[in-house]
Image (spheres, rainbow, N blue to C red):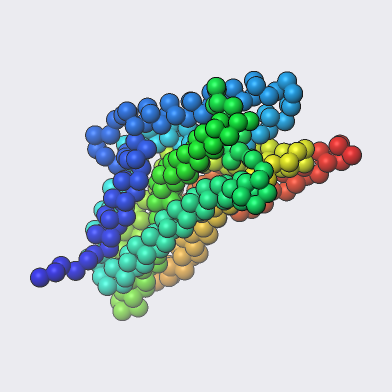
Amino acid sequence: MQTETRPSDNFHKLLRIIRLSSSLIGVDIIDENYKFNYVVAFVLLAIAWNYMCSIYTICKDLTTDWTVLLDVFSPISCATQGVVKMCSLILYPKLYRELALDLLEIYKKYQVVGPNYEAKLFEWNKSMKKILIIGGLVYFVSALLALVTPLFLYIYKGERHLIIMCQMPYVDVATDHGYFITIGYNVLCVFVAAFGLYGADLYVFLFLTHSIFFYDIFALKVGDLHKILHENNKDKRIKSLINDITEWHQYYLEFNDKCNVIFFWSITAHVLCTTLGILSTLLIIMLKYWPGAYPYIFVCFVWLYMYCILGTRVEICIDQFCDGIYDINWYDLDVSDQKTVSLMLMESQVPRVITIAGIEPLSVNTALKITRSIYSLVMMVMQFNE
């Protein structure tokens, strides 16, 4: 007889996919016995080799063209982003594991509470699956866009352009042989970088999206409380329900605090590197001809807003919690329970938003500020050139 699939089973499958993807870059930190391994060492060495090739490219062309600094800086910002994200994962494996296992326990606990809770958890499963697919498509399309432009120009115009401005020692891109070897190396770098960044970002998607979902359980708990209050406001179950709601809200706040700890460097590096990548690419467009700059700048903007949209959704969820606490029928409660709700309301007045370097909130509003600053700076450079 086939057993019925539960939300916890679906979550476990998604977690297994995340672990498999991250294990390919050596950061399966959900593994209880996780240690620094040869896969991580190989990835870090590959990134170090990429840095060396970038330094070689600068040394080779700097005397004749100083804009090579911008050419190299744009793609190397992605490598820097990858290093920081990997180091962040390696730095807090216990905390990552704790949060992942906590989520699994939440699924196991609430799937048996009632059909409403189980239905909501199934919605979480579907939403999480969509977010992982969208994230994967973003990185795949990003890699594809980087490859299509030079390929199109080579086929239809016969122009030779590198995918990323990174040359290897003893390989002359002026020759046919050297050009195709370099292009092959570029293709490898682009796809490895896209998969590596996606593998590291899977944990960001996992935890920040569940931070968005927590309000759903809170709303169901408050609904259960109102149902009991409507039937009998002297019911002995009310106090335990109030305490349960308070504990859930407190766990939500602690969850966001832990996300801020483990994602501090990842989010900071992501926003900073994409911003600098956009800025340097815009300067390249203004100073010289590089067709690959246009898809790259588009990709950087997508990466920037992808994170910031997640941060905004967390902000919206925090506001929902605050409104949800206001909606509790506190006037039907006894004095001690009213005080508990009051304390919970006071805590909700200090939002635990996801931040960039502990300074600015991770939100679309911050992304728009960054975009305006980039625009102002570019306009200033254009006027200076004139």
Q: Residue furthest bottom?
A: 231
Find residue 273 and report its image quarter.
Answer: top right
Is 237 in front, or is 28?
28
Find residue 209 and report its image quarter.
Answer: bottom left
In the depicted structure, whether residue 140 falls above or below residue 175:
below
Residue at image x 73%, y 48%? 372
In the depicted structure, whether residue 245 falls above or below residue 29:
below
In the depicted structure, whether residue 126 falls above or below residue 346:
below
Residue 86: horizontal and vertical position, in percent?
Answer: 43, 35
Residue at image x 59%, y 27%? 172
In the picture, measured across the screen, residue 246 lies left or right of residue 153, that is left
Is 202 in front, or is 338?
202
Q: Is residue 376 visible?
A: yes
Q: Is residue 377 visible?
A: no
Please state, as top left, top right, bottom left or bottom right, where the N terminus lies in the image: bottom left
Q: Residue furthest front?
A: 176
Please state, as top left, top right, bottom left or bottom right, where the C terminus lies in the image: top right
Residue 320: horizontal and vertical position, in percent?
Answer: 49, 62
Residue at image x 86%, y 37%? 385
